[in-house]
């Protein structure tokens, strides 16, 4: 009964209860962090699946992907190649350069040009990457925009958000068709406002800025990070169980030792039995001379 009571005291002690609260908080935090990392993994997996499905697909007509040119681009339609026949706007005020765009670790610009299709629909097209002038925030020798009618293949990308910053003349901070149209003085009536195009090919081919790299389809380390957080979540309750078990073992050892020390002192007047093995006493056989001597002694007695 004493052991059960002592164990109950350990389980209900302030130290154990505080440890239990800490374990629950830390384990819950690790589980939530693992779920967050797993969510990021799922997002990356979905994005990679869309890229692998659309990036190298055969080009289709624009209206098959965007029946409504003012609607946002569906997530499942990102990177879809579309084919347009028409011409670029080649005026002096028809080109914008998108700031702070990187290629192979270098910061430069994207060349952004409106392309007007035969049906009158206008799509903003990123023709490629242009390096910046050393020491200045200006594009260096951009490739000229080709003139005349041509066929272009572009991969559709969702419109970027508007950044609330005033850009320098001829530049913009993001590829947002509505904002870009205002900067270029274009009408938005027949403009694709929910998406822009990333140039894949021009026919006939001509000089163009550096092509943008293919999108990354790697899934990253998020899945392994998720499992690491979940393993950490199991560590804390396991540590608390181990610590409590050690306390129970120490308690049992102390009570056993106390019981062993108290047993001899419980009956002080009683001698403890000696259980050591004793040597057996062997009886020597009496000789004939000894028997005759005893007989003479008995005869002389009165």
Image: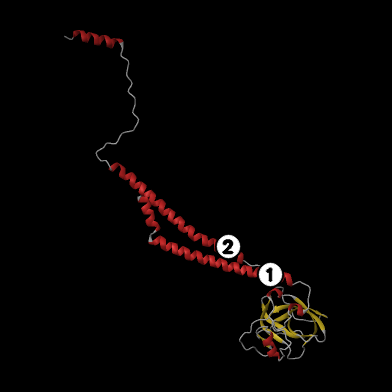
Placement of the C terminus among the 4 image quadrants: top left
Q: Which mark identifies residue 227?
A: 2
Q: Secondary structure at mark 2?
A: helix
Residue 5 appears left or right of 189: left
- Assess disc 2: are there few (<14), some (14-19) or many (≥20) residues with their C-alpha within 10 Å of its C-alpha: some
For label 1, the SS is helix
Q: In the rendered image of this protein, does residue 184 appear above or below residue 129?
A: below
- 270 up-or-down from 135: above or below: above
Q: Position of residue 77 (x, y in %)?
A: 71, 75
Of residues 207 and 87, the one drawn nearer to the viewer in this rendering: 87
Asked if residue 26 is positioned above or below residue 102 in the image, the reply reads: above
Please, which residue is most extreme toward the front here? Answer: 67
Quarter residue 41 falls in: bottom right
Residue at the image position 39 percent from the left and 51 percent from the top: 250
Residue 264 spot, x, y in % from top left: 30, 41
- Outermost left residue: 302
Q: Residues within 10 Å of mark 1 (few under 14, many from 20)?
A: some
Q: Residue 151: x, y in percent?
A: 81, 81
Q: Which mark is residue 48?
A: 1
Query: In this view of the protein, which residue sits in the foreground, 287 or 112?
Result: 112
The residue under the point 49% across, 65% down is 26
Q: Earlier in the sequence, mark 2 or mark 1?
A: 1
Task: Give me the disc on residue 258.
Answer: none
| Quarter-of-image position of residue 90 | bottom right
* Structural distance between the alpha carbons of marks 2 and 1: 21 Å
């Amino acid at each position: 009964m004493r052991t059960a009571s002592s164990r109950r005291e350990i389980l209900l002690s302030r130290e154990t209860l505080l440890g239990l609260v800490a374990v629950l908080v830390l384990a819950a935090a690790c589980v939530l962090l693992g779920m967050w990392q797993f969510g990021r993994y799922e997002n990356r997996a979905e994005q990679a699946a869309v890229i692998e499905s659309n990036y190298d697909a055969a080009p289709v007509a624009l209206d098959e992907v965007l029946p409504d040119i003012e609607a946002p681009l569906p997530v499942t339609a990102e990177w879809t190649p579309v084919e347009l026949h028409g011409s670029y706007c080649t005026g002096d005020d028809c080109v914008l350069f998108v700031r702070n765009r990187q290629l192979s670790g270098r910061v430069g610009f994207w060349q952004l040009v409106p392309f007007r299709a035969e049906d009158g629909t206008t799509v903003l097209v990123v023709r490629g990457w242009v390096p910046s002038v050393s020491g200045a925030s200006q594009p260096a020798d951009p490739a000229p925009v080709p003139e005349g009618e041509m066929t272009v293949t572009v991969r559709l990308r969702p419109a970027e958000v508007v950044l609330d910053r005033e850009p320098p003349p001829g530049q913009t901070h993001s590829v947002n068709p509505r904002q870009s149209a205002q900067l270029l003085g274009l009408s938005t009536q027949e403009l694709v406002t929910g998406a822009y195009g990333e140039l894949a090919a021009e026919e006939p081919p001509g000089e163009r800025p550096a092509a943008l790299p293919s999108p990354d389809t790697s899934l990253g380390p998020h899945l392994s990070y998720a499992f690491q957080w979940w393993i950490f979540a199991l560590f804390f309750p396991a540590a608390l169980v181990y610590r409590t078990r050690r306390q129970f073992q120490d308690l049992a050892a102390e009570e056993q030792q106390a019981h062993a020390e108290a047993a001899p002192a419980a009956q002080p007047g009683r001698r403890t039995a000696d259980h050591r093995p004793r040597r057996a006493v062997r009886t020597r056989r009496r000789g004939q001379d000894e028997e005759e001597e005893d007989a003479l002694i008995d005869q002389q007695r009165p």
